[in-house]
Image (cartoon, rainbow, N blue to C red):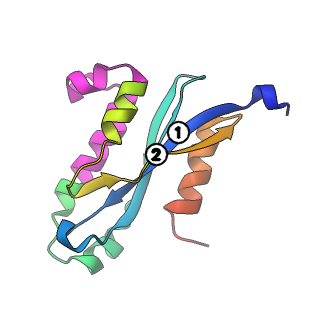
Amino acid sequence: MRAAEMAVYDYAIVRVVPRVEREEFINAGVILSCQKSGFLQAAIALDEERLLAMDPHVDIDSVRRHLAAIVAICAGDAGCGPIAQLPFRQRFHWLTARRSAIIQTSPAHTGRCADAAAALEHIMDRMVRPLP
């Protein structure tokens, strides 16, 4: 593979912070954007058992809905309102903006790849899914 085939991408880890004041979180997904290929996608793998161990009173249904909304906004789902209709780079920046809420993202990081979907899966395996 030649370097010219490589594309720059940005990604952020999606975190669930059940009690914001404690600043404890678990990684629950990844949002990846590649401007060259027009790629914007989120993948989610919430470990509900770990989340409940951190906070047995967390509203799991609410967390699921918020995580599903991230995936839908990335996909441009019209049911998600005007945010989902923004150009994909603006959606990425809106999703990764700093906030103090139960769902947060890490700072954005940059990488290079030939296949954005494969890069998303690689980051999910490395940063979100349980280690083998």
Q: Horizontal and vertical percent for residue 43?
A: 45, 46
Q: Earlier in the sequence, mark 2 or mark 1?
A: 1
Q: Quadrant of residue 120?
A: top right
Q: Residue visible at 62% across and 52% down?
A: 122
How busy is the neighbourhood of tag 2: few (under 14 within 10 Å), some, or many (20 plus)?
Answer: some
Residue marked by disc 2: 108
Amino acid residing under circle 1: Asp
Q: Quadrant of residue 77?
A: top left
Q: Residue visible at 46% across and 36% down?
A: 41
Side (left or right) of 78 relative to 36: left
Total numbered circles:
2
Side (left or right) of 6 relative to 86: right
Q: Residue visible at 24% across and 49% down?
A: 99
Q: Check the image and report above or below for 17 versus 90.
A: below
Q: Horizontal and vertical percent for residue 53?
A: 28, 80
| Mark 2 and mark 1: Cα distance apart in space | 6 Å
For mark 2, give the secondary structure.
loop
**Could you tell me which quadrant the C terminus lies in?**
bottom right
Q: Horizontal and vertical percent for residue 63?
A: 23, 56
- Given residues 65 and 24, the one toward you in this image is 24
- Given residues 99 and 80, the one toward you in this image is 99
For mark 1, give the secondary structure.
strand
**Could you tell me which quadrant the N terminus lies in?**
top right
Amino acid residing under circle 2: Ala
Q: Which residues are magenta?
A: 64-88
Q: Are marks 2 and 1 in contact (CB under 8 Å)?
A: yes
Residue marked by disc 1: 10
